[in-house]
Image (cartoon, grey):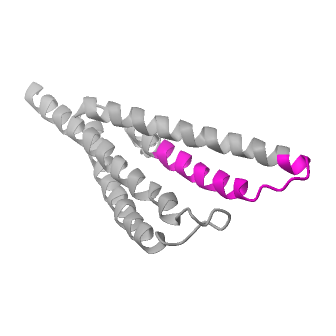
Amino acid sequence: MNRFVKELEKVQLTLGVIFLSIFFIVIMIQITTRHLGIPVIWTGELANYSFIWAIFMGAAVMVNRREHFNFDFFLKRLKGKARILLSIFNDLVLILFTIAIFYYGIQVVQKFWDYNWTALPEMKMGYVWLSIPIMGGTMIIYTLSHLVNHVKSWKEKGAGE
């Protein structure tokens, strides 16, 4: 499972970088064309939506790297089984939260799938909001991986005592 999680993170990080690059390129196009007095209507929308994808992909990666949600104040002060138990609790709370993100993200995609972009009417809003359940689903996978590792650590600590 750890290998799968590493590969999934690479894919997600790559997607995040691609969308962040699109964001910066489009912003530069927007600045340049505005300066030249040539309005390019679609740049604002594309910048917004690519930024949404970049942020959501990055947020999931941060959860995998444990740089997002943690009760650090207590975690740093605990050792052994107490620390593992708090980590398991954190994982369970985070799984509940990410299940909600995934579930409601699917509902958002279904509701807004047929809405069109303003500047690019051939593009559907569903493609934008698809980032929510993808983020939620990958957060679930990442957190389940952490939970499995914490439960293994808990069992190893129990066997060693």
Residue 83 horizontal/vertical position (percent) = 30, 37
Q: In this rendered view, identify the residue nearer to me: 86 or 124.
A: 124
- In the image, taking residue 121 as reference, residue 40 lies left or right, namely right
Residue 101 horizontal/vertical position (percent) = 39, 61
| Residue 38 counted in the magenta span | yes
- Residue at image x 63%, y 42%? 22
On screen, residue 124 above or below 12 = below
Magenta portion: prevailing SS class: helix
Boundaries of the magenta span: 33-59
Residue 65 visible here: no
- Residue at image x 65%, y 45%? 23
Q: The C terminus is located in which quarter? A: top left
Number of numbered callouts drawn: 0
Residue 135 horizontal/vertical position (percent) = 42, 51
Q: The N terminus is located in which quarter? A: top left
- In the image, taking residue 9 as reference, residue 28 lies left or right, namely right
- Residue at image x 36%, y 48%? 139
- In the image, taking residue 133 as reference, residue 44 lies left or right, namely right
